[in-house]
Amino acid sequence: MNTQESVIDLCPVAASRLQTAALLAVKDLQRGETVHLLLREEPSLMLQSLNLQLRHNLSWQISAEETGEWRVLIRHREDVAPRDLMDILSRDHQRLDELFGLSLQLVNAGKTSEAAPLVMEFAAGLKRHIQVENDILAPSFRIPDAEPVAIMLHEHGDILAQTANIESLFAGEEPVQAWEVSPFLAILSGVLAKHEHREEQNLFPQWDIALRMAAPEDRQALLTRVQKILSNMQQ
C-alpha cells in the first residue's frame, strides 16, 4: 500500500476551473494516499459533487486556516471507517462491481474456468446484499417517498433470477463456453449499473435521514448487523 502525502494549492485557480483542477488532483487517489487541498472558498458543495463523480470513493475533513484559506484532507474511503449507511452499502456495491467486472473480463478472454469461482463469490455477495436491503432495511424505515423501495424490490427479483441463470450455466457438468454465458453477463452488468445508481441517488439518502432519527444505540446496532452480514461474518 502506498503511503504518499501531497499538498496541492488551488488558491490561484480561477473559480471557473476549480472543480476540474480538484478532480484532477484526487481522481486517481489510492488507498494509503493523502491529499491536502488548499482553497480560497468553503469547499463542501464542490467535494460532494466530486464524490458523486468518483462513486463516493472520497473521505475528507475540512478545516479553516488562520490565513482565511480552507484546507481539505482527503483520503480514500477504504482507509476510514464507514460514516453512515450510504457509505456501507455503496462500498459493497463497488466491491461487487469489481468482482463482476473481473469475471466478465475473464469470460471475454475465454477463461471461463478462472471466472467461475469469482462468479460464485459475486453471486453469494449479491444475495447477502439483497437480503440486507429486502429483509432488514426496507422494513425498518418509513420514508416520505416509498416509490424507490417498491422499485428496488421489483428489480431485486429480476436481478436474482438473472444471477441464478448465470450460476446454473457455471454449475453444469461440462465447462461453460464463453459464448454461452457472456451475453447474460453483459445484460446483468447493465441492469446492475442502473439499479445501483437509482439506489444510491434516490433511496440510500432517505434511509440515512431516517436512521439519524433513531436512538444512537439502535442506530449502531443496525449498522453493525448490516456490516456483519455483508462481510459474511457470523450474526
Image (tube, rainbow, N blue to C red):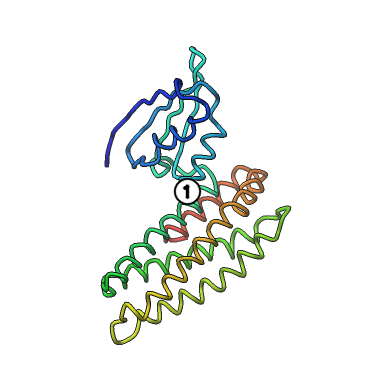
Picture layout, residue 100 above or below residue 67: below
Q: Is residue 32 left or right of residue 154?
A: left
Residue 88 or residue 9, whichever sits in front: 9
Residue 231 or residue 207, whichever sits in front: 207
Q: Is residue 133 left or right of residue 108?
A: right
Residue furthest out toward the right: 144
Q: Is residue 98 left or right of residue 40?
A: left
Query: Could you tell me which residue is drawn at 40 percent across and 66 percent down?
Result: 122
Give the x, y percent position of residue 105: 32, 65
Q: Is residue 139 left or right of residue 231?
A: right
Give the x, y percent position of residue 24: 40, 36
The N terminus lies in quadrant: top left
Residue 152 or residue 183, whichever sits in front: 183
Give the x, y percent position of residue 133: 57, 61
Give the x, y percent position of residue 102: 33, 63
Query: Could you tell me which residue is drawn at 44 percent across and 37 percent down?
Result: 23
**To which residue does mark 1 refer?**
55
Q: SS at mark 1?
A: loop
Q: Amino acid at mark 1?
A: Arg
Picture layout, residue 36 above or below residue 137: above
Q: Residue 141 appears in which quarter of the rendering? A: bottom right
Q: What is the count of numbered marks?
A: 1
Q: Residues within 10 Å of mark 1 (few under 14, many from 20)?
A: some
Picture layout, residue 197 above or below residue 177: above
Q: Residue 124 appears in which quarter of the rendering? A: bottom left
Residue 75 or residue 49, whichever sits in front: 49
Query: Could you tell me which residue is drawn at 31 percent across and 81 percent down?
Result: 176
